[in-house]
Image (cartoon, rainbow, N blue to C red):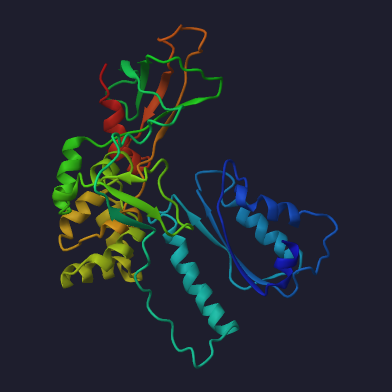
């Protein structure tokens, strides 16, 4: 890796933050290399670089790995051609609040330091990206499309108790849950219970009707992961249906990010709607985008109900819709307290998301978990 870095003349680093300011796992090898004591101070004298950090200013060590990397490279002789950018989840536009200005400054610097050949011409506008999957209709489907059935760590449980333990007028909805299972569940101190929410059949049916997929909802199709550098939700079956995907895997109640509108514009045919999308994505339309989407926590489903001309091809559903994320809860009891089959986790002090927390979780997890009935 050291030889590869030394041979480069320009590197742009995008660095995430994990835990309490720790570097991401993918960066560990590089960081250990840079910490070697015998490295000469002019090791990267021919290297131009810039760093953009991803973090959350609610934590004390905000963008700490990005700051450390920038400082270390400078100490080894590298040249920082653009001031370090620091994306903040707390910004009203999320990471985009710092990313867009940073990219603008970076491009100006790059054009000056690394001018394009006159024959290359101006940068072309981005074209529609390739879908990350290829879907193909199937004549038949497996007997079951249950997404978690083959996972030995997945358990079907029955709710025995769902009790709110905070006052009704308190802004946090904290609950105590008890579950019963026919199977023996073993767990250790520090383990967590992960609840996978599902969308209701009524919500899914209405959404599929809105998208014009009602007649295709139960048609089985295969999924081929073609863009391997882009991830898919966990436990996606090889053969599935639209109804199963939007019930268990894809979240149409999430608050959309700007990337959602960027790809939506490729599938919108109405001129007025396209102009509105262009305005949302422009630097001048940042405030309007924030007021329309982020301020009122408008969901993807609500947005699509307004942009009625949008017709999203099936191959692009994983590019448009975010994954339906599970939620982790602390386990309050020991396996030694209750004997099978009454020893599933007792989830105590489970805080149901409220308006100051992640909006995606609030739209689905809050009603799903709070409405679980014994």
- Seen from the viewer's position, the closer of residues 246 and 64 is 246
Residue drawn at the location 64% of the way across and 53% of the way down: 27
Q: Quadrant of residue 43?
A: bottom right
Q: Quadrant of residue 198?
A: top left
Q: Is residue 213 left or right of residue 5?
A: left
Question: As drawn, which residue projects farthest toward the bottom?
Answer: 118
Q: Is residue 311 left or right of residue 198?
A: left
Q: Is residue 31 left or right of residue 266?
A: right
- Seen from the viewer's position, the closer of residues 238 and 230 is 238
- Seen from the viewer's position, the closer of residues 298 and 150 is 150
Residue drawn at the location 76% of the way across and 65% of the way down: 76
- Seen from the viewer's position, the closer of residues 355 and 237 is 237
- Quarter of the rendering occupied by the C terminus: top left
Image vertical order of residue 122 relative to residue 43, above or below = below
- Quarter of the rendering occupied by the N terminus: bottom right
Residue drawn at the location 28% of the way across and 68% of the way down: 266
């Amino acid at each position: 890796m050291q030889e590869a870095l030394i041979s480069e003349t320009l590197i742009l680093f995008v660095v995430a933050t994990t835990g309490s300011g720790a570097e991401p796992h993918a960066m560990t090898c590089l960081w250990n290399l840079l910490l070697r004591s015998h490295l000469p101070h002019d090791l990267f004298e021919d290297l131009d670089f810039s760093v953009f950090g991803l973090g959350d200013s609610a934590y004390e060590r905000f963008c700490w790995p990005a700051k450390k990397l920038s400082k270390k490279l400078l100490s080894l002789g590298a040249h920082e051609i653009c001031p370090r950018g620091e994306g903040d989840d707390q910004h009203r536009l999320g990471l985009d609040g710092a990313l867009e200005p940073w990219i603008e400054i970076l491009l100006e610097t790059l054009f000056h330091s690394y001018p394009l050949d006159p024959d290359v011409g101006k940068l072309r506008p981005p074209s529609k990206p390739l879908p990350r999957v290829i879907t193909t209709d199937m004549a038949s489907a497996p007997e079951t499309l249950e997404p978690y059935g083959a996972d030995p760590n997945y358990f079907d449980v029955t709710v025995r108790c769902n009790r709110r333990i905070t006052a009704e007028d308190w802004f946090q909805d904290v609950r105590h849950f008890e579950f019963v299972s026919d199977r023996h569940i073993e767990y250790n101190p520090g383990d967590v219970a992960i609840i996978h929410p599902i969308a209701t059949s009524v919500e899914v049916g209405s959404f599929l009707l809105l998208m014009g997929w009602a007649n295709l909802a139960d048609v089985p199709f295969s999924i081929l992961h073609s863009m391997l550098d882009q991830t898919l939700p966990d436990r996606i079956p090889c053969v599935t249906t639209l109804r199963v995907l939007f019930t268990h895997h894809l979240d149409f109640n999430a608050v959309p990010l700007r990337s959602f509108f960027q790809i939506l514009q490729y599938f919108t045919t109405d001129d007025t709607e396209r102009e509105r999308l262009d305005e949302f994505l422009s630097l001048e339309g940042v405030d309007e985008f924030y007021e329309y989407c982020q301020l009122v926590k408008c969901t993807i489903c609500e947005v699509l109900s307004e942009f009625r001309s949008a017709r999203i091809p099936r191959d692009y559903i994983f590019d448009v819709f975010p994954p339906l994320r599970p939620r982790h809860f602390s386990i309050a009891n020991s396996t030694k307290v209750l004997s099978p089959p009454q020893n599933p986790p007792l989830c105590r002090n489970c805080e149901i998301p409220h308006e100051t927390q992640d909006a995606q979780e609030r739209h689905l997890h809050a009603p799903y978990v709070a409405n679980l009935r014994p």
